[in-house]
Structures are given as C-alpha cells and as structure tokens.
Image (tube, helix red, strand yellow):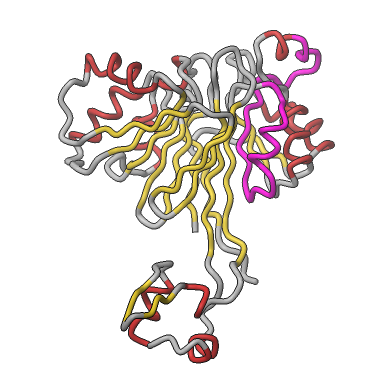
Amino acid sequence: MLDVCLLGTGGMMPLPGRWLTACYTRFNGSALLIDCGEGTQVALKSAGWSCHDIDVICFTHFHGDHISGLPGLLLSMGNADRTEPVTLIGPKGLERIVNNLRVIAPELPFRLEFIELENPEETIDINGYTLKAYTVSHNITCYCYAQIIKRAGKFMPEKAKENQVPMAVWSRLQKGENVELDGRTFSPDMILGPERKGIKLAYCTDSRPVPSIVKAAKGADLFICEGMYGEPGMEEKAKEHRHMTFIEAASLARNAGAKELWLTHFSPSLVRPKDFVEQARIVFRNTKVHKDGAAKTLEYPEK
C-alpha cells in the first residue's frame, strides 16, 4: 500500500490555513516528498508525519513556492538524527541551486545525492518503486511525476516444482532476485504467475494541459493536479501564466482514465475553491478539492 498526504495546497504565497505546495508519500518504510514549499516541515508535523524517514525529494521546478522550504526541512531532518543519504531529483541545475540554498544549512549529518533530469521522459527505479518524470509546459523547465508500485505475480508452487526450482531459493525469487545455485540460474518468472496490477500516483503542478500529463496520469489510482483557477472567466489568465483551470485539470483526468482527481496549488485569490468544483465534476465526476493535510492510503486491488 501507498500512503499519500497532501501537505500544502497553496500556490504563489502561503495563506492562513494553506501552506505552499508539497506532497508526501510513504511506501514500505521509504518516504518521498514532491516539492517543498515554505512551511512544509510545519505541515509534516501537523499531519503527524516525521521528516526523519524522507529519503527522496523530487522537485517539479525551481520557483520559490516549490523549493523555498528545503533548507529548513534539511536542518530538521538533521536534528531528527537522520544519517542515511537523501536523494534529490529535479531539473538540470538542481545541485547548484540546492547548494546555494544550503548557505543557511551548511552542515548536515547525511549526504545529499543528486539526480538531474535532462530528457523529456525519464525513469528512475529507487527504494522498491519506479518514478517516471515527464516535461510539462510552464514558463521555466518543469516536470510532472508518476510514482508506480509494481506488484509481482502470485507464487505458484506447482510452477516451481515443474521448473525444478529448489525450495531453498523460493523466498529470494519472490523478492525479485535472480539466483544462481549448483550451476543453474533461477529467475522469478519460474515460480510466479503474471504480474498483477500495482498502484500508481501521478502529480502535476504549474503547467498548461499537454499530452505528457495524460501519459503520466494514465490509469492512475490518484491524480493530484494543479487547479490554479476555479472561477469562471479565468481561462485567459491561466494561459498567460502557464497554469490550469479546474475544468482543464478535470479534462486531463478524464482523458487519462484516472480513478480520482485531487485539485491543488490554488491561487491566493481563490479563497473557497470548493465553491467551484461542481463544474469540474461535470467533466470528471470523481474530482475533489481538499485542504492541507488531506490523506489517503492506496491499496492493491483485491483481484
């Protein structure tokens, strides 16, 4: 299962009761943070999560409302006695920008490792899940992300016996390892059935609607997408500032065949976003507007 918490739903500037953009996920003891706006560490505490276990931080882009909370968060992680490395992922230039921000957080008890994205689509396998990054359309280089939890097929003892796989290696094969024993190589497919449906989360902020977002959100169990503007008549402003309206985000969710849409990254002028969600629901019924701290556990399908 994958725990998801929408820490901050604000765009541009924090407001009372609305922190800036950040999303936290947790899988099998590994925690991922996507974006780190101002107030992220406070939002984490308020939601009941610890910063200690964050081992991957992804950035969509380098505007302040998506990265300004990083120095404080890193210091808090250090004060929480984290010593294991932390991987940072984002557009090209990430290491330079983070090192500049670390002028106020120069000493950390853990190492930072950087993965800089340069291609329109990139895949990273890390901590038991897969991250896919896709370029989107903002006024600077920006990526959306899909977090994919794959699920192996069921263990089939009759298949293992048919392939003469020793019981001694069954457990390792079920974990996805290839095993060499007595001159033979054994692979997971020798004891497992077809791969089962896993879990997929997609996350996108700061973009106009583009096909790469549909690709990222294809079949997602949960699609978290910016809805900068909900009020009628804001279409031209959304185009001008390279953002989206509620209805445009709902159209992406519908075209991607996502199961559920959470809108986020609201304009400071959008004081009551729930007042405008019904028009988006005409396009995509399972559209939701949440406050900071909204959480859900995504589970494997029963079948």
Of the pair 125 and 242, the residue shown nearer to us = 125
Answer left or right for 97 relative to 64: left
Residue at left offset 73%, top offset 39% = 253
Answer left or right for 240 relative to 118: right
Residue at left offset 70%, top offset 37% = 214
Q: Give x and y (percent) for residue 97.
A: 35, 16
**Which image quadrant is residue 224 in?**
top right
Reply above or below: 11 against 131.
above
Q: Give x and y (percent) for residue 23.
A: 48, 36
Q: Give x and y (percent) for residue 261.
A: 67, 40
Reply above or below: 296 against 269.
below
Q: Give x and y (percent) for residue 280.
A: 78, 32
Answer left or right for 92 relative to 75: right
Instruction: Name the image quarter holding the C terminus.
Output: bottom right
Reply above or below: 82 against 154.
above
What span is in magenta?
A: 208-236
Residue at left offset 42%, top offset 49% = 26
Whether 231 is among the magenta residues is: yes
Of the pair 208 and 44, the residue shown nearer to us = 208
Residue at left offset 64%, top offset 20% = 137
Of the pair 260 and 220, the residue shown nearer to us = 220
Whether 126 is among the magenta residues is: no
Of the pair 199 and 44, the residue shown nearer to us = 199
Answer left or right for 171 relative to 222: left
**Which image quadrant is residue 37 in?**
top left
Q: Residue furthest right?
A: 282
Reply above or below: 180 against 86.
below
